[in-house]
Amino acid sequence: MNEPVLKIENLTKTFTLGKRKIQPLTGLDLEVKRGEFTAIMGPSGSGKTTLLNLIGCLDKPTDGKIVIDNMDIARLPESQLCKIRRDKIGFIFQNFNLLPYLNARENVELAMELAGKFKEQRKQRAKDLLATVGLSGREQHRPQHLSQGEQQRVAIARALANDPAIILADEPTGNLDAANKQEIVKLLAELNQKQGATILMVTHDEKVAAHTRRMLFLKDGKIIDEKQGSKNGSF
Amino acid sequence: MGILTRAIRNISRRKARALLLIVVLSLALAIIISLPPTIIANQQGNQEIINEILRGIQESSESLNLTATQIDCKLGLQFLYNQGPYKNVTMMVTPFLNISDYANLTSIPEIADVIPILSYWLPDEENYYFNVTYNGYTYVDFMYIEGIPLEASYIERFPSILPTNDWTLTAGENITAGRNLEAGDHGVVVLTEVAAYYFNASVGDTINLLEHNFTVVGIQGVGRSTLPFAVYMNLEDAQTITNTTGQALKLVVFADNVENVDTVENKIKEQYPELEVQTNKAMINAALENKEYWEKKLQNTQASLDNLKNTAIMQIGIVVAAQVAIILLIMLYSVRERTREIGTLKAMGASNKMILGQFMLEGTLLSFIAGVVGIAIGTVGASTLGNLLLPRLHRYGVDYIVTAEGQEVAVPLAITITPELILAGLGIAVLLGVLGSLYPAWRAAKIRPAEAMRHE
């Protein structure tokens, strides 16, 4: 339980915009242990999404070390990074990012298909995962026929599909109404508590962050503060 | 849920666009598969014309060889008393010549052969002229007896010496009953229809001429003959019955080729100034012109065909380029439109290869579907498309052929779409799909996931 899933040391990211250099991350250190539900908070432009992209292997750091499941991913080539994304990471996006031409089950299945799982196996698991997120009987619906809350549940089931080491959630409630917001964050907390999923969530909503057990505050590319909550997730 | 199903679903997501694209691409494919068979059909049509032309050239050459190398040599007209058939009168006639006097003609190297011909005009004993009404026409003339040396070596090489009243016809073609004279014939004659009517003779009958019996072996049609009462026979027979042994009216000299006719003419005139030498100059010119005409026609036909081929190649090139460009643009647009989706796929762990494959499959599948539709259109409308896109080759080409009789005959363009062509069409469709989607798919694969996720 105390074994770190994610270990970041001196992480730096610099973007060049013409002659200007922007440095959203300036030597960030972070450790996330297996089974932790962590929220990263911070104002706009504090580097939250950049941090998530780097951990999720969607972008490469300028400097520093990112170790996921004992593997330093900072210098891996794209051909290796796609395998890390597939096997170690589950993404949940603010806009859900479901593929509109696939139904709920197929969206969940696709993640497993990319991982080379057999058809029967992935079909059953997709069904089970959709049941876990409360979408039993909605498997055949395409995203456009699901509510926003339901769409985010499908995205959560998809993120869980390959049993990842860490789930990265980028403002997962950002596009949801108050009721759905509560439901989704509760679901995430439940997955963390019952299934032991490690979740790293970026949010600027304190009410949402309050459901996690650990809150990190990001400012000017560094973590400036940290709060630990109780076991049931309240601060 | 394989890659193919995803490709099909992606295509059907934008139904109107896919449909429009398929319509445009299928038309392009229809054009691509319609043009080659149109060219083949044209080639076949042209082959008929070319065959016709080649036949024309050959006939021209043959008629040149048959008649244009012929040079007639006679003595000049003289006032003669009691000459030949004209008893007890003085007449201006062509005198008979002694064949042996001109034996040296064969020493002129450009001469292929010298053939003596006896022409003898026989008057009617009672009425001077023979007078016969046949088939509604009245013919009044002397009887014309022609003696031809019926030797195999002459006849084989110069069939024009056989009885024929129309030089444009091959010797013997105007024999309407029985047969023409043959090498070695003796005691037989070929009669004109009017002469046969006069003698009341048909093939196999015997006639009496100047107290000699002859068996009729053939009847010559009236044709355009200016000699209604003609009797053709062996030279020796003619000399015997007309008491002209060793004599002939003319010597038919054959030059070894058309180009040497003038040389031969000059040499004869030089050696035998008493001879009147007559060449078939007009005929030579006509034959040469004829040959030239056919050769020009052949050139035109081939040029038209080349032109047609070039046009078709150019059109196919344009269509192929347009098709690749259309697929390229549509797929580039699709990649741009689906950038976020590409980002999501990458975030889920899709490899660059998988993204590349997905987009290439979509482009190729679209092109393949268009190929199937295009082949269907092409099979039905190849003829219309071919005629619409390629210049019509009037006269020397597809639409009409000119027969030997000079008639224009419509030749329908027989365009056939063969199974090989259908397979080739599908192959081309797939290939163009691959070519057109290669770059957009590569672009899609190379999109950096973080950028893709930021894309609006």
Image (tube, coloured by chain):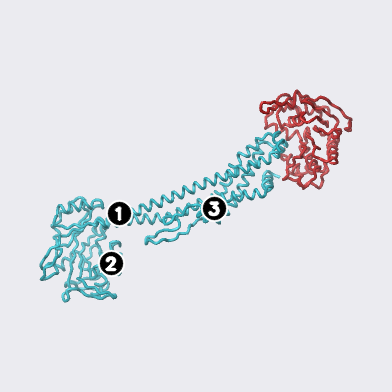
Chain colours: A red, B cyan
Q: Is residue B190 left or right of residue B454?
A: left
Chain identity of mark 2 = B
Q: Is residue B7 left or right of residue B107?
A: right
Q: Nearer the viewer, residue B39 or A73?
A: B39
Chain identity of mark 1 = B
In the picture, the disc for residue B454 is none
SS at mark 1? helix
Q: Quadrant of the C terminus of chain A?
A: top right
Front tag of 1 and 3: 1
What residue is shown with label 3? B419
Residue B145 point in image, percent of width and height: 20, 68
Q: Which badge, 1 or 3, is on the more N-terminal residue?
A: 1
Front tag of 2 and 3: 2
Q: Nearer the viewer, residue A114 or A141?
A: A141
Q: Which badge, 2 or 3, is on the more N-terminal residue?
A: 2
Q: Quadrant of residue B158?
A: bottom left
What residue is shown with label 2? B224
Residue A212 point in image, percent of width and height: 85, 32
Calculate the distance from the C-alpha at mark 2 to the C-alpha at mark 3.
56 Å
What residue is shown with label 1? B288
Residue B200 point in image, percent of width and height: 25, 76
